[in-house]
């Protein structure tokens, strides 16, 4: 909008003051905003720390799965232990998470 600021000061014994200033106030265009808002730095840091944490978690998970896929010496207890064969349950979700992160 357009606003007009007026000062009309009249007091006995002093000089009469009259001033008027017209200003226009408009919202910023989408290209006129700051690129990085200083008060939002904590939010930027939290977003990047979450991305870094997800990357480290995915990397750790992939390395763990690769280590579990390596052949190892088995004894009779391992043959009877069925959890030894369920090590690849996290492989599909880890691949999906890493793929989403890369894209």
Image (cartoon, rainbow, N blue to C red):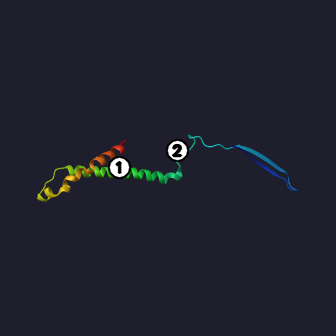
Q: Is mark 1 on a helix, strand or loop?
A: helix
Q: In this view, does 8 lie to the left or right of 68?
A: right
Residue displayed at 52% across by 44% down? 35
- What residue would you read off at disc 1? 55
Q: Which mark, residue 13?
A: none
Mark 1 neighbour class, 10 Å CA radius: few under 14, some 14 to 19, many 20 or more: some
Which callout, 1 or 2, points to the residue nearer the camera? Answer: 1
Earlier in the chain: of badge 1 and badge 2, it is 2
Q: Residue furthest right?
A: 13
Q: Nearer the viewer, residue 46 or 84?
A: 84
Q: Position of residue 96 (x, y in %)?
A: 32, 45
Q: Nearer the viewer, residue 96 or 22?
A: 96
Q: What element carries label 2?
A: loop
Q: How many marks?
A: 2
- Alpha-carbon span between mark 1 and mark 2: 26 Å
Mark 2 neighbour class, 10 Å CA radius: few under 14, some 14 to 19, many 20 or more: few
Q: Is residue 74 left or right of residue 60?
A: left
- State whether residue 53 is above or below residue 22: below
Q: Where is residue 43 in the image (x, y as percent from the top left)?
A: 48, 52
Q: Position of residue 79 (x, y in %)?
A: 13, 56
Residue displayed at 85% across by 51% down? 16
Q: Nearer the viewer, residue 90 or 69?
A: 90
- What residue would you read off at disc 2? 35
Q: Position of residue 20 (x, y in %)?
A: 77, 46
Quadrant of res 102 = top left
Which quadrant of the rendered structure holds the C terminus? top left
Which quadrant of the rendered structure holds the N terminus? top right
Q: Is residue 9 left or right of residue 70?
A: right
């Amino acid at each position: 909008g357009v606003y007009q600021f007026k000062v009309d000061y009249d007091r006995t014994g002093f000089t009469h003051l009259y001033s008027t200033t017209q200003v226009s106030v408009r919202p910023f265009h989408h290209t006129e905003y700051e690129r990085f808002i200083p008060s939002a730095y904590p939010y930027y840091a939290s977003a990047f720390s979450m991305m870094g944490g997800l990357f480290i978690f995915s990397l750790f998970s992939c390395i763990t799965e690769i280590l579990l896929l390596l052949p190892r010496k088995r004894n009779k207890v391992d043959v009877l232990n069925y959890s030894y064969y369920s090590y690849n349950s996290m492989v599909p979700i880890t691949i999906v998470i890493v793929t989403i992160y890369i894209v």
